[in-house]
Image (cartoon, rainbow, N blue to C red):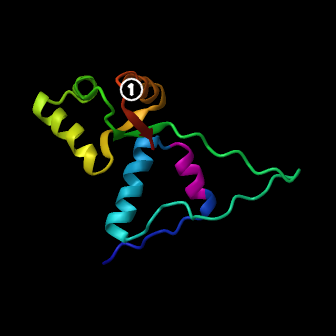
Amino acid sequence: MAEEQKKITPEELAKILANVTVIDLNSTMKILEKDYGISVQAPVAAAPAAGNGAAAPAEEKSEFNIELKAAGEKKIEVIKVVRDVTGKGLKEAKDLVDAVASGPQMVKENVKKEEAQEIKKKFEAAGAQVELK
């Protein structure tokens, strides 16, 4: 005999979710997407205007990707910074810097804001152009 599933109300679900850790919520979202095909992404819509007519402040980004735009004149210094930041070997770092000639190259992904700012300063000190995305 099949077991009957009890339906829960949105209020009951909210009480359950209030006691769940962020890690468990992330796992739950992945299960919903994988097993049930339910995408749990926030809908893209215009932000509602505040009561005084000013736009709501945007949420500040906490993680950045560091993209090397141009190596500049001091190519050797830039290669040293790439090695320092990524832990890559000399050849891999040189290849990445050389590839900038054909287009911007991703140096490091998902870096905390403070670390990203420090890395950007290192590249700029070496004469390179970087962008935080």
User: With 124 as the anchor, is 50 left or right in this view?
Assistant: right
Which residue is pictured at 41% across the width and 49% down the height?
26
Q: Residues within 10 Å of mark 1 (few under 14, many from 20)?
A: many
Residue at the extreme right of the image, as rendered: 52
Which residue is at a point 53% across and 40% down the rendered structure image? Answer: 61
Foreground: 108 or 50? 108
Q: Is residue 79 left or right of residue 51?
A: left
Q: Residue furthest bottom?
A: 1
Q: Main secondary structure of the magenta part?
A: helix
Name which quarter of the figure residue 94 lies in: top left
Please tell me whether mark 1 sits on a helix, a strand or a loop: helix
User: Can residue 109 be found in the magenta stretch?
Assistant: no
Q: What residue sits 37% from the left and 71% below the top?
A: 37
Residue 21 pos. (x, y %): 46, 40
Amino acid type, residue under disc 1 in the picture: Ile
Q: Residue furthest front?
A: 73
125 or 51: which is nearer to us?
A: 125
Q: Is residue 13 above or below residue 86?
A: below
Residue 11 position, x and y percent, is 63, 58
Establish if 66 lies above or below 29: above
Q: Nearer the viewer, residue 127 or 117?
A: 127
Q: Position of residue 39 (x, y in %)?
A: 44, 66
Quarter of the rendering occupied by the C terminus: top left
Q: How many numbered callouts?
A: 1
In the picture, the quarter occupied by the N terminus is bottom left
Q: Nearer the viewer, residue 115 or 11?
A: 115
**Range of magenta residues:** 12-19
Residue at image mark 1:
119
Up the image or down, 4 lies above or below 56; here it is: below
Residue 94 sits above or below residue 25 on the image: above
